[in-house]
Image (cartoon, rainbow, N blue to C red):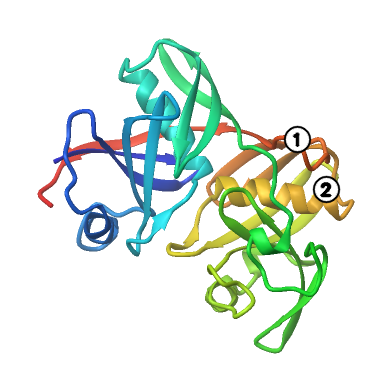
């Protein structure tokens, strides 16, 4: 089976083109192929196919084999792949993931996509729909105690659930390997959670690390970056156009602050390598 390894700010997936390839057991393939020691290695796999509700569809599986609803870095890479491989000549098109349709605008240089802007849709703030267990309808700057440490979390869904914690120290110095798994499986999150730990640099810049459910720490998370900016705006920490500095690179996020309005994410999409593997 042929594959293409791609990444957005270091958030790397193994992309399989279902226009030409067949994957019979995607869950098993994700577990095997994502292993960084014995196989290709990645945060999961993403299958690319023709869409029913959109121009194209991406089907995402995390490295532990669980199905993922949305991946902001992944969808930019899918956009690059379908344009660069001449499946479309449009610079504006749609991609669906688990039924959610996203609108993409790509920037092209010398016939290749170098970045993509994604309409990620409006954030979901209702606690029951994220979901997060709370006595409040919305979880904004709400206390949660994990391993004896108090945090204030703001919860947002961008198609998948996120809990954002603003911390005083640089996220690079934060014990993510300790707290990430504890947040992911905390009893207040019925579907598990993606946990973001962020420091406000100024009103236009945020530094962030992320622990993703089903994948562990990743170098970047598109939906998590969007959720972090939404949370920062809701708490009054930043303006409406913010650069988020992740371990793998930077993403630009725009949101008006109106809960009915879409969040827009702009960032790179890059190839790592291509190859062929037996599954």
Q: Give me the residue at 75% from left, 48% from top.
A: 230
Q: Give me the residue at 75% from left, 58% from top.
A: 199
**Nearest the eye: 76 or 202:** 76
Residue 92: percent from the left, percent from the top? 52, 17
Residue furthest out toward the right: 236
> In the drawing, does residue 212 fall left or right of residue 21?
right
> In the drawing, does residue 79 fall left or right of residue 131?
left
Cα distance between the residues tagged 1 and 2: 13 Å
3, above or below 246, in the image: above
Q: Which residue is mark 1?
A: 261
Residue 17: percent from the left, percent from the top? 25, 33
Label 1: which secondary element: loop
Q: Which residue is mark 2?
A: 233
Q: Give me the residue at 61% from left, 37% from top.
A: 120
Instruction: Using the image, tell me which numbered label, if any, was put on residue 123.
Output: none
Residue 257: percent from the left, percent from the top? 83, 41
Label 2: which secondary element: helix
Q: Give me the residue at 37% from left, 61% from top.
A: 66
Say if residue 160 shows up in the picture: yes
């Amino acid at each position: 089976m042929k594959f293409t390894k791609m990444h957005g700010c270091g958030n790397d997936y193994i992309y399989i083109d279902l226009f030409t390839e067949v994957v019979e057991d995607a869950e098993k393939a994700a577990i095997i192929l994502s292993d960084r020691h014995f196989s290709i290695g990645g945060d999961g796999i993403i299958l690319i196919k023709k869409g029913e509700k959109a121009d194209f569809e991406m089907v995402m599986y995390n490295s532990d084999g669980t199905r993922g609803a949305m991946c902001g870095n992944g969808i930019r890479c899918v956009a690059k792949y379908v344009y660069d491989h001449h499946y479309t000549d449009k610079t504006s098109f749609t991609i669906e993931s688990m039924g959610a349709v996203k609108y993409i605008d790509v920037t092209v240089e010398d016939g290749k996509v170098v970045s993509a802007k994604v309409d990620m849709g409006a954030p979901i703030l209702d606690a029951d729909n994220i979901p997060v267990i709370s006595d409040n309808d919305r979880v904004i700057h709400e206390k949660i105690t994990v391993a004896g440490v108090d945090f204030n979390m703001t919860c947002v869904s961008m198609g998948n659930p996120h809990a954002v914690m603003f911390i005083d120290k640089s996220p690079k110095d934060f014990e993510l390997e300790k707290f990430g798994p504890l947040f992911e499986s905390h009893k207040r999150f019925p579907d598990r959670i993606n946990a973001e730990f962020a420091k406000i640099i100024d009103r236009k810049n945020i530094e962030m690390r992320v622990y993703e459910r089903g994948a562990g720490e990743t170098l970047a998370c598109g939906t998590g970056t969007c959720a972090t900016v939404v949370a920062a705006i809701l708490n009054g920490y930043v303006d409406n156009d913010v650069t988020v500095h992740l371990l793998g690179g930077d993403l630009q996020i725009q949101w008006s602050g109106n809960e009915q309005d879409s969040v827009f994410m702009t960032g790179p999409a890059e190839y790592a390598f291509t190859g062929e593997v037996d599954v």
